[in-house]
Each structure stands twice: as structure tokens, then as C-alpha cells.
Amino acid sequence: MTSTDIPFTRLLRVETRKLFDTRSGLILAVSAIGLALVAVVARGLTSEPRWFTLAGTAAIPLGTLLPVLAILTVTGEWRHRTALTTFALEPRRGRVLAAKCLPPLTATVAGCVLALLAALPMTAAAAAVHGVEATWTVAPAKVLGWIATMVLVTGQGLGMGLVLLNAPAAIVICLASTALWSTVARLGDMGAILAGWLDLNLTTNPLMNGGFTGDAALRLAVSVVVWIVVPVAAGMLRISRKEIG
């Protein structure tokens, strides 16, 4: 069989299976789902029954663990030394990398949808327990913005994993970025300006809150280019030229 006989859908199925067939990947996936559901339930027990507010609580575990899962996905071939086999079967590395990047992004969307669905009965139950009327209405743009934000956060993990090919280093950078930019923002006017343009957590806030303006779009575009587009492009270029042995 030649490489041209391998359809992209098969590559996608293989890479999707790899997302969960290691112990670390399975633990992360199960933990992300479990903690997301726990967060939704806990928020429902302690706050007003607002559907989207309850669902949005899942962003904390999903936004922390799914980027780590994405990093492990794109660095796993090099960590387990299976890249030689993979690229021997499919020498066109760009197709393999594309197939690796799509499953974590799809899993992120699925996680958000699961949180939204889980929040439905919890919102109704919380309304019944507290004896108040539940709030179900939310602007579609706000829901889509929230999902898009979660996808971008996972995309940052993919970018760091691809450009570094070192899971511990990429994980540390992703998890420490929030604290780092919070510190930078306190370093006077220049620090606040830098954070306002480069902190992905900050530039995605208008997207999540539904208050997206032209200036907010420009700031988001800059941070996405810096933290996602450039690392992904650099990582793919590095992998395409990397000797495999």
C-alpha cells in the first residue's frame, strides 16, 4: 500500500484513537469530563439557576486540562519514539499533523456541548430547590464566543506542543501564562499595554462576554497570531524538516 492509498479520514480516526489510548490521555479526558460535571453541579448548588452561568463554570477544568491533552497528543510520537513508524506509513507529515490537531479541537467543542447539556437539568433542579424561576435565555453570540474561546485555549496548547516538542515545557508555559501575564499587567503602563494585546486570556474576554468590538477583534487577532498561528506554523515547519531516527 502506498501513502496515496491512505485517506485522510483514516488518519483522523487513528489520531483520534491515540488521543485516548494512552493512560495519561485517558486520565486527562476522564478528569476533564468529570471535573466539568462536578463544577456545573457545584455551581448549581451555590448560585442562582442561570443556565449559561452554570455551563460556563465548566470552562475552568476544561480550559486547564484540554490544552494539556492537546500537548500530549502532538508530542506523544516523539516521547514514545513512534514517529518513525507513523511517518514511514504516511510520509506526508503535514497530513499527519493536521490529523493530530483536529481531535483535541473537536474534543473541546464536545466538552462545551456536554457542559451546556449537563447544565440543563441542573438549572431546573436548582430552580426547584431554591424556589425561584430559572434563567434560560442567553445570546447565541455569547455561547458561540465561549466555545470559540475554549477552542483557542486548546489551540494555544497545540501551538506550544508543536513548536517545543517537549510536553513538560509546553505544559508549564500554558499553565503559567495566566499568572505571568497577570504579573506583567502590574508592571506599569507598558506592562498593561503588553498584556492588553498579548494575553490570550485577556483578549478573549470580550469574545466570551459578547461585547466584541473592532478594537477587541484586533487585540484578539494579535494574541492569536503570537500564541497560536506562529507556534503552529513554526512547529509544523520544524517537524517537516526534523530528522527521525
Image (cartoon, rainbow, N blue to C red):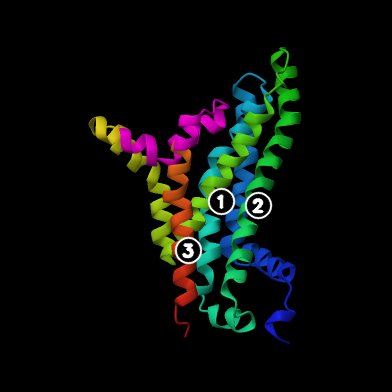
Position of 47 relative to 3 (above/below) = above
Residue closest to the far left: 188
Query: Looking at the picture, does residue 95 appear above or below residue 128?
Result: below
First in residue order: circle 1 vs circle 3: 1
Residue 22 lies, in percent from the top left, at 60, 67
Q: Position of residue 79 (x, y in %)?
A: 48, 72
Residue beneath disc 1: 66
The one nearer the camera, 241 or 65, is 241
147 vs 237, left or right, is right
Picture quadrant where residue 42 is located = top right
Q: Residues within 10 Å of mark 2 (few under 14, many from 20)?
A: some
Mark 1 Cα within 10 Å, few/some/many (few <14, many 20+)?
many
Q: Is residue 201 magenta?
A: yes
Three-letter amino acid code at the position of disc 2: Ala
Tell me the residue that label 2 is attached to.
107
3 and 2 marks in contact (CB < 8 Å):
no
For mark 2, give the secondary structure. Answer: helix
2 and 1 marks in contact (CB < 8 Å): yes
For image coordinates 45% across by 30% down, the residue present is 215
Kindly identify the amino acid type of the residue bearing the numbered disc 1. Leu
Local SS, label 3: helix
Q: CA distance from mark 2 to mark 1?
A: 8 Å
> Compared to 93, does 192 lie above or below?
above
Magenta highlight on residue 55: no
In the rendered structure, which amino acid carries the disc numbered 3?
Leu
**Residue at 65% from the left image edge and 30% from the top image edge:** 141
Which mark is nearer the camera, 1 or 3? 3
